[in-house]
Amino acid sequence: MSETVQSGAQEWPEGLQVAITGARATITLNRPERHNSLSQGDMVGLTETLQTLEKDPDLRVVVLTGTGEKSFCSGAFLNELEDRKFKGNPFEDLTDTLENFRLPTICAFNGSVYGGGAEISLCCDFRIGVEGMRMFVPPAKLGIHYPEKGLRRFVSRVGLGPAKRILLTVETFDDAALSAIGFLDYLVPRTELAARTDALVADITGLAPLSVQTMKQSLNEIAREQVDSEKIKQRIALCWNSEDQREAVAARAEKRSPIYHQR
């Protein structure tokens, strides 16, 4: 997944690498010495990075991955957790921002995922796993109760039964089991991760962005049982009356690829 950085003078938070190529941004968690775990500062930095990228009118998709081949993310930095050195709830701010992100998001697992890293990945729209990866979530081993929003995400994404296996038994799931419970959308050999990610990015960026973004909003609201039918009707009307819709019709008639402008 080679990227060309086009961020100009933009400075990104320590512990993150951000690369932008065309309509794609790739955020790489860069704390491999501690399995890409996130300190409070890292969580704030990642949240702020997402907020910055969300304002970029040229972007259509964001990929989240990690440095190294061992771990995508192991959740919160345990030293801070054990010392209770945290203020507010930066993890919830991060996961809410990621889940509600305007653009489609792809989690490209460079390795295994543990703890809160699993919830971070569940906030992405798509998850691409690699053969040999594992996942477990250990709050019951730490004597803590997982937060409500996180519990809802596990139940919503994989179902109640698998969520109980994940949280009540701290079962370690291998790649096949992660696919079987629906945690992964795609599972590929490690050597094919970049190509599969690129292909999914191409699929998404080739579609009408207003359609993709508004349907993402509606689907997430339906999943959370927070449906506002009037808002969905407004999104439908927005797409029907958009320049992109007219461009799609024209391109089909002219037998060419459409050029969308997100309006």
Image (tube, rainbow, N blue to C red):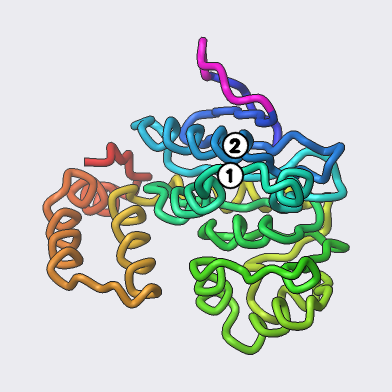
**Hey, which quadrant is residue 60 in on the image?**
top left
Q: Give the labeled residue for mark 2.
A: 26
Secondary structure beneath label 2: strand
- Horizontal side of residue 259 vs 115, given as left or right: left
Q: Is residue 10 magenta?
A: yes
SS state under label 1: strand
Name which residue lies at 55% across and 42% down. 87
Of callouts 1 and 2, the N-terminal one: 2
- On whether residue 40 falls in the magenta region, the answer is no
Task: Give the residue displayed 82% in from the left and 45% down from the top.
Answer: 35
Q: Position of residue 170 (x, y in %)?
A: 79, 76
Whether label 1 touches label 2, CB < 8 Å = yes
Q: Which mark is residue 144?
A: none
The stretch in magenta equals 7-14
Q: Position of residue 232 (x, y in %)?
A: 20, 66
Q: Specify whether 150 is left or right of 259.
A: right
Residue at 77%, 66% (x, y): give it: 142
Instruction: Look at the picture and state if 155 lies above or below 28.
Output: below
Q: Residues within 10 Å of mark 2 (few under 14, many from 20)?
A: many
Residue drawn at (61%, 34%), measured in percent from left and top?
Answer: 41
Judge whether residue 202 can be spotted in this image. no
- In the image, 37 versus 67, the foreground residue is 37
Left or right? Give the position of 165 relative to 71.
left
Query: Which of the 4 image quarters holds residue 14?
Result: top right
User: What residue sits right under mark 1 in the picture?
Assistant: 63
Specify the amino acid type for callout 2. Thr
Marks 1 and 2, how far apart at CA? 5 Å
The three-letter amino acid code for the residue at tag 1 is Val
Q: Position of residue 178 (x, y in %)?
A: 73, 73
Q: Residues within 10 Å of mark 1 (few under 14, many from 20)?
A: many
Q: Is residue 6 above or below residue 77?
A: above
